[in-house]
Image (cartoon, grey):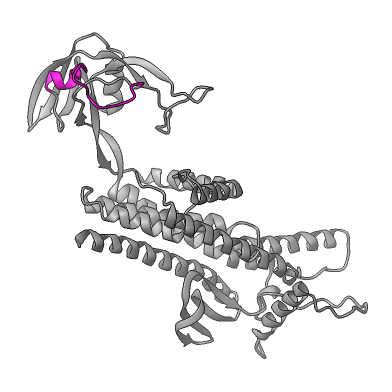
Amino acid sequence: METVLLYILGILVVLVGIAVSIGLHEVGHLVPAKLFGVRVGQYMIGFGPTLFSRKRGETEYGVKAIPLGGYISMAGMYPPARESGKARSASTGFFQSLVQDARTASADTIKQGDENRVFYKLPVYKRVIIMLGGPFMNLVIAVVLFAIVLCGFGTQQLSTTVGSVSACVVPASSASQKCTPDAAAAPGAAAGIKPGDKILTIDGTAIDSWTQATSIIRTSAGDPLAITVLRDGKKVDLSATPLLTERYVYDAAGKVVEDASKKPVTEKVGFLGIGAAYELKQQPVSAVLPAVGTTIGQDVHLILNLPARLVDVANAAFGPGARDPNGPVSVVGVGRLAGEITSINTIPFVERFSYLLGIIASLNVALLVFNLVPLMPLDGGHVAGALWEAIRRFFAKLFKRRDPGPVDTARLVPLTFAVVIILGAMSVLLIYADIVKPIPIG
């Protein structure tokens, strides 16, 4: 029962974090819009039927039934159609109807006396500030949460304390990594090294990091090493001779290096058979922005390769293949990961809570990057429209031509409609994949 409750708690924490992030994202739009005098009719978290709302001044604040985003309704999001002076035949096409409906809905948000309090009449820089306010808020949330996780809780890093001791020596190329009756005893176990021992010195060299210790061990095959450890508050002197054994070669990301034929690369190194214990180490404030930048880079790379990633997800969901642990996930997948992590009783609760904060921080970075994609109805699409308007007006002024006026962004509504359909299909695919073929946490 406790495990189930912890699982549910993890999901709830992440869901609340997502809801708060969405709400603050919309606040990022709301505040500059009101400061610039735009009439904001609604501030809503979610879509669909309204569950709760209350009006404050001219703005209705509320929560809707489908918690997959949010919005603010600004007066005059789309400019009216420009009269060309030429007769045009009436059109009842589907896309033309979408464009006209968008213009009509935009016009309906303009109340009498508020004709100059509309979005499309604002200077370009003010419209850009309003539309970037949401992503900027996600960036602020991400920086704050990363700071709490890295500087407050810390990150798991290798310590100089022994976490595991192998009983025997098993070559990396062996089909089984289990000890056999004829397997040689691991030098570390034979020397009396125990889990929990803190390595102080190796051959007289003070050990400050596990990497330093393994470097000495790997290059000392066949040479006896004097090892001093701290055990139960007392120094213990031991002696161990590393064996020359075959081990896999790992890259900087911790993955096994493969040759041209996709076979794991191995090397002959000294081996004691001891592994490091991990411990939380608080990071300096200077580590926060690089961590955020790295996450932004990963999300940008994911979005740029999204079509191929979605094909991989579909192949895994409808075939025997495994999911890419670094691939895209839906809200369902995020909730499942949060629940599983929270319910692992072998990990201290503080570390589990830190992991949940890290998930929410990463989601805010994803919201930041995704919303900057220059497609309507995303924030980046509105920014692109405003910048295009500025470019057109600049060249019109440069060549002494008539002001072309606001960009008719309503004409992009059919594209917006297509983007919404694609995003919906993508969400359905990811949710299905997260149910039938979830990404393992290990």
Q: Is residue 373 visible?
A: yes
Q: Position of residue 25 (x, y in %)?
A: 49, 66
User: Does 440 sit left or right of 43 as displayed?
Assistant: left
Q: Position of residue 292 (x, y in %)?
A: 45, 48
Residue closest to the far bottom: 112
Q: Quadrant of the C terminus?
A: top left
Residue closest to the far top: 222
Q: In the image shown, does 126 or 160 lie closer to the viewer?
A: 160
User: Does 120 sit left or right of 230 as displayed?
Assistant: right
Q: Quadrant of the N terminus?
A: bottom left
The residue positioned 23% from the left and 14% from the top of the image is: 242
Q: Is residue 79 visible?
A: no
Q: Is 261 situated above or below 76?
A: above
Q: How many marks?
A: 0
Residue closest to the far right: 86
Q: In the rendered structure, which segment of residues is drawn in magenta?
A: 173-192
Q: What main secondary structure does the magenta stretch of the protein show?
A: loop
Q: Is 423 situated above or below 210?
A: below
Q: Position of residue 18 (x, y in %)?
A: 42, 64
Q: Is 173 situated above or below 118?
A: above
User: Does 414 sit left or right of 367 as displayed?
Assistant: right
The residue positioned 72% from the left and 75% from the top of the image is: 98
The residue positioned 37% from the left and 61% from the top of the image is: 14
